[in-house]
Amino acid sequence: MMYNIDKLYESVAKEGAVCVGLDTSPSYVPSSMVKNAGSGAAAVLDYNKAVIDATFDVCACYKAQIAYYEALGFEGLSAYAETLRYIRKKNGLVIADIKRGDIADTAQQYALAHFAGEFEADFVTLSPYMGVDSLEPWLRYAESAGKGAFALMRTSNKGMRDFEYRELKDGGRLYHAVGDKLSALAADHMGVYGYGAFGAVVGCTEREEAVEIRRKYANLFFLIPGYGAQGGAAEDAAALLQNGNGGVVNASRSILKAWIAVAEAAGDVSAYQMDNRKAAKFAAESAYNEAVKMRDAIKNAVESKKGTQ
Amino acid sequence: MMYNIDKLYESVAKEGAVCVGLDTSPSYVPSSMVKNAGSGAAAVLDYNKAVIDATFDVCACYKAQIAYYEALGFEGLSAYAETLRYIRKKNGLVIADIKRGDIADTAQQYALAHFAGEFEADFVTLSPYMGVDSLEPWLRYAESAGKGAFALMRTSNKGMRDFEYRELKDGGRLYHAVGDKLSALAADHMGVYGYGAFGAVVGCTEREEAVEIRRKYANLFFLIPGYGAQGGAAEDAAALLQNGNGGVVNASRSILKAWIAVAEAAGDVSAYQMDNRKAAKFAAESAYNEAVKMRDAIKNAVESKKGTQ
């Protein structure tokens, strides 16, 4: 059996390293689409489907941030479940960005919720604070169903310095201690392309640090946030890849709101929202163009990196 | 305006320090109740209501572990929402045990989900790994709506040693660094009884460490897991209280499964499940008795502690 991480590796090799983040707020959706859908949550689902269809051949996978759906209550969670189902039915891969982390009995319940049933995803994100026993129940799904996970290691937000970055008495920083444990877990569940079923969330960061992290944790597949809206660039992301693979680079707002950027540049946002179908088509095309631009920028950065090595 | 943490303080003063954990698995519910309810999720809701009614005057608050409900899909989440609503309608206090932790934009969406709308709770639990900026969006709800939160600090599971317990280069352990930040946040949002709106999750632990933690973080209200099923005792919990307040001690399984323990001791579990109403009454009474036993054990431990000081 192949792990999902192996499928993700193949997807990156074929379609590039972009992970399209579906952190979809109703405020990103053209007003005519919201009106047509009848509710913010229904509009989010329509919008997600349009973006998924448009970007399917130019991205490696999708990531759905559950918070945006929970904020819309049951209707939002229904849009969440439908979004995951839509991607999986097309044989796409989807990461449930849920950052769960709890004692083993509870983790087992969470795994039931997100690796099976109505909210089934291919991967989840996890928070490591409580330790390895909080991660282990998820791991069992690697062997039984190929499932994968990305645990928080070194994120790209400002608050990262508060704890993740703290230096330990025994040497290294807290995120190194997390990386060491994750790397050991990965070694016990190795896929066919040299990456474990369990990877890590590592944000775009200073180049030197990225190079060190990539070298030190060669068997960890990275989920890389912080591109675009959060300030990271293609070169930063490329530094966290190995031969252009071994990681996916997430962008959410820059892709979901690409149509707004284009419309604003043209000087009239409302003109692009008037007609429901035209607006959907325009938003989808803008998302596609942005994803392609990002995919190619990362590809070029990977090529330049090879040139300098 | 009083913070919810002030209401919780008053509740502890009046009803004792027990927090009834509603981590309700359908397997804890008498079979006749499940049959009568028609589904596991509906049975969980019926069971919760019976336990809430029975324990309402002998506990300080409730804690609902969302994982157990997510595992049952939409029906489970409906039981979760109904459970929260049931407690709040009775003017009880409920902690949503969700352990969220994400970048600020996402945290804002989560706060919308759990401090308002269909899943509104009085308190949440949070994971601090990503740093203070991941906690701040929740804090705003302290001022606007009295809401509170407990961030993970020093838990009682085995894996706690992996990261929480790591010694830092600058002195102290990781959980101290977290406690220091939380204590500073609490100081900016102080309630009327000397505790900040933001508290911490601190598990039952070795006595000496508990005494040190309690002394060092005097302005933090503690949510204390690890009692009963997880091995902690009344004396351990009392060490984390100040004059019997400043914390709530959670027990889930020992209360929810109290009827099973009684029935097993009587030698015939199935006899106690035959009739739907009798089973509910028996389970509720057993939960009540267990909560009272725990409340009194903590009270006695607090008195003995006073005697030795």
Image (spheres, coloured by chain):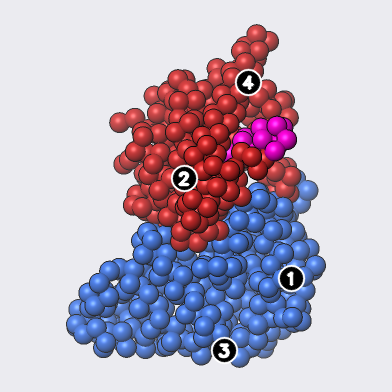
Chain colours: A blue, B red
Magenta-drawn stretch, dominant element (helix, strand or loop): helix
Residue under the image location 46 percent in, 61 percent down: B74
**Which one is in front, B6 or A152?**
B6
Q: Counting other residues with Cα less than 10 Å from the Cα at mark 1, is it few (<14), some (14-19), or many (20 or more)?
A: some
Residue under the image location 52 percent in, 67 percent down: A119
Residue type at numbered disc 1: Glu
Residue range in magenta is B256-268
Q: Are marks 1 and 4 in contact (CB under 8 Å)?
A: no
Residue where numbered disc 4 is placed: B297
Residue under the image location 54 percent in, 30 percent down: B285
* Residues flagged by tags 3 and 2 on a common chain: no
Q: Counting other residues with Cα less than 10 Å from the Cα at mark 4, is it few (<14), some (14-19), or many (20 or more)?
A: some
Q: Counting other residues with Cα less than 10 Å from the Cα at mark 3, is it few (<14), some (14-19), or many (20 or more)?
A: some
Relative to A138, does residue B226 appear above or below in the rendering?
above
Q: Does residue B214 appear anywhere in the picture?
A: no
Q: Are marks 4 and 2 in contact (CB under 8 Å)?
A: no
Q: Are marks 1 and 2 in contact (CB under 8 Å)?
A: no
Which is nearer the N-term, disc 4 or disc 2?
A: 2
Residue where numbered disc 2 is placed: B46
Residue under the image location 61 percent in, 91 percent down: A14
Q: Position of residue B84 (x, y in %)?
A: 42, 44
For residue A114, side relative to residue B207 (left or right): left
Residue where numbered disc 1 is placed: A143
**Which one is in front, B290 or B284?**
B284
Cα distance in 3D space between marks 3 and 2: 50 Å
Cα distance in 3D space between marks 1 and 4: 44 Å
Residue where numbered disc 3 is placed: A15
Q: Position of residue A290 (x, y in %)?
A: 42, 84
* Residues flagged by tags 1 and 4 on a common chain: no
Chain ID, mark 3? A
Q: Does residue A153 appear anywhere in the picture?
A: yes
